[in-house]
C-alpha cells in the first residue's frame, strides 16, 4: 500500500498558530518536503521535530516530485509544507498533489493558517463571495491587464503582494478599478499586525516608509454597479477616459462593462470607433 501525502499548514507569523495535529503529522512522517529548508528547519527545531527534510520549490519540482512520489509508493508517509501558511495556495505543490492523486496516493489536508482567509475574515468587506487571484504580475502593463480581468469579479477580490511593489500596485488599482474600498493587511499575526483601510489612492499616503519582509494581502471591494450607473460619468465618457489612460480597446470595453453593466461587445465596437477617430 502506498503512503499518504499530507498537506500541512504552518504559521504565517505567530508560532502559536501551529496546530497539535500538524506537529504530530510532521513528527510521524518519513519525510518533509519544504519550499525553503533553511526557513522550515527553524520551525521544526522550535517544535522538536527531527523528521528528515528535503527541498521542493518551483525550479526543482520535476526532479524532487519524482523522488517524493517514489517515497510514497514505497509505503512511507510524506508531509508537504510551505514557507508559511497553507501549501499550494500561491505556493508550489499543485503538481505534486495532482501526480500523487493520479498514482492512487491518498492526499490529506491538515488545515491551519492561511493569510488570504485570515485577512478576509477581519477586513470588514463582504465575505459571502470572493475571488482569490494570487500575486499580480510584476510589470505595469501586464498588471493592469490582470486588474482589468478582475473588474467584474463577483464579491471581494483578494490579492497577495510583496511590500516593495505595494505602492505601484495601488497606483494601478486606482487607475484601473477606480475609487473602490481597499484594505491592506500587513504583518498578519505578528507584533505589528495592521489593517489599513481607504481607497487605493488614499492608502498610498498611509503606507510606512520602511519595507517590512514577508507578503501583504490586498482586498478590493466589488464594484457598486448601481451607484456607478446613477452617479458616475456616462459610458461614452468612461470609454474616452479609459482610452486616454492608454488602455487597449479590449481592456476599455471590459472596464466600462464592469462599471455599467452594459454589453461588452457593444462597448468594444464603440471604443473601436473612438480609437480609429483618434488615429485619423
Image (cartoon, rainbow, N blue to C red):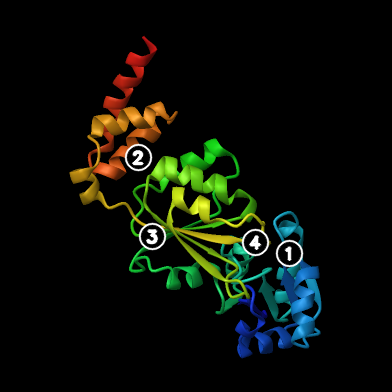
Q: Is residue 62 above or below residue 187?
A: above
Report, in whole angstroms, how far the alpha carbon at label 4 lies from the one at label 2: 32 Å
Q: Earlier in the sequence, mark 1 or mark 2?
A: 1
Report, in whole angstroms, how far the alpha carbon at label 3 lies from the one at label 4: 25 Å
Q: Earlier in the sequence, mark 4 or mark 1?
A: 1
Q: Pick whichever, 45 or 25, lies toward us.
A: 45
Q: Which residue corresponds to the image point at 43% horizontal and 40% vertical from the top-left?
A: 175
Label for residue 92? 4
Label for residue 198? none
Within 10 angstroms of label 4, few (less than 14), some, or many (20 or more) residues? Answer: many
Please name the residue that numbered disc 2 is placed on.
Answer: 255
Label 4 sits on a secondary structure element that is loop
Foreground mark, 1 or 2, reads 2
Which quadrant does the N terminus fall into?
bottom right
Report, in whole angstroms, how far the alpha carbon at label 4 lies from the one at label 1: 8 Å
Q: Percent position (x, y) of residue 120?
A: 44, 68
Please name the residue that numbered disc 3 is placed on.
Answer: 156
Residue 199 in the figure: left or right of residue 166: left
Report, in whole angstroms, how far the alpha carbon at label 3 lies from the one at label 2: 17 Å
Please name the residue that numbered disc 1 is placed on.
Answer: 56
Q: Percent position (x, y) of residue 176?
A: 42, 41
Q: Which residue corresponds to the image point at 47% horizontal and 39% vertical from the top-left?
A: 145
Q: Pick whichever, 88 or 114, lies toward us.
A: 114
- Quadrant of the rendered image containing residue 157: bottom left
Residue furthest to the left: 230
Report, in whole angstroms, how far the alpha carbon at label 1 lies from the one at label 3: 32 Å
Q: Earlier in the sequence, mark 4 or mark 2?
A: 4
- Quadrant of the rendered image containing residue 233: top left
Within 10 angstroms of label 1, few (less than 14), some, or many (20 or more) residues? Answer: many
Foreground mark, 4 or 2, reads 2
Q: Percent position (x, y) of residue 246?
A: 45, 28
Q: Are marks 4 and 1 in contact (CB under 8 Å)?
A: yes
Amino acid at each position: 500500500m502506498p503512503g499518504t501525502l499530507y498537506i500541512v499548514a504552518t504559521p504565517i507569523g505567530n508560532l502559536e498558530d501551529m496546530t497539535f495535529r500538524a506537529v504530530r503529522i510532521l513528527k510521524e512522517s518519513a519525510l518533509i518536503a519544504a519550499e525553503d529548508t533553511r526557513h522550515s528547519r527553524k520551525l521544526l527545531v522550535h517544535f522538536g521535530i527531527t523528521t528528515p527534510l528535503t527541498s521542493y520549490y518551483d525550479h526543482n519540482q520535476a526532479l524532487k516530485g519524482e523522488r517524493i512520489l517514489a517515497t510514497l509508493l514505497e509505503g512511507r508517509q510524506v508531509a508537504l509544507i510551505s514557507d508559511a501558511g497553507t501549501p499550494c495556495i500561491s505556493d508550489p505543490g499543485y503538481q505534486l498533489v495532482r501526480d500523487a492523486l493520479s498514482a492512487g496516493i491518498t492526499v490529506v489536508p491538515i488545515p491551519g493558517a492561511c493569510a488570504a482567509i485570515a485577512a478576509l475574515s477581519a477586513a470588514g468587506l463582504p465575505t459571502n463571495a470572493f475571488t482569490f487571484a494570487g500575486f499580480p504580475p510584476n510589470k505595469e502593463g501586464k498588471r493592469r491587464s490582470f486588474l482589468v480581468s478582475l473588474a467584474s469579479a463577483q464579491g471581494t477580490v483578494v490579492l497577495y503582494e510583496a511590500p516593495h511593489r505595494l505602492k505601484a500596485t495601488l497606483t494601478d488599482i486606482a487607475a484601473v478599478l477606480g475609487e473602490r474600498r481597499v484594505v491592506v493587511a500587513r504583518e498578519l499575526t505578528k507584533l505589528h499586525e495592521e489593517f489599513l483601510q481607504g481607497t487605493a489612492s488614499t492608502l498610498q499616503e498611509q503606507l510606512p516608509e520602511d519595507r517590512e519582509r514577508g507578503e501583504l494581502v490586498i482586498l478590493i471591494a466589488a464594484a457598486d454597479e448601481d451607484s456607478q450607473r446613477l452617479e458616475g460619468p456616462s459610458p461614452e465618457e468612461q470609454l474616452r477616459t479609459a482610452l486616454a489612460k492608454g488602455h487597449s480597446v479590449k481592456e476599455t470595453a471590459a472596464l466600462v462593462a464592469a462599471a455599467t453593466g452594459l454589453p461588452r461587445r457593444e462597448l468594444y465596437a464603440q471604443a473601436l470607433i473612438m480609437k480609429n477617430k483618434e488615429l485619423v
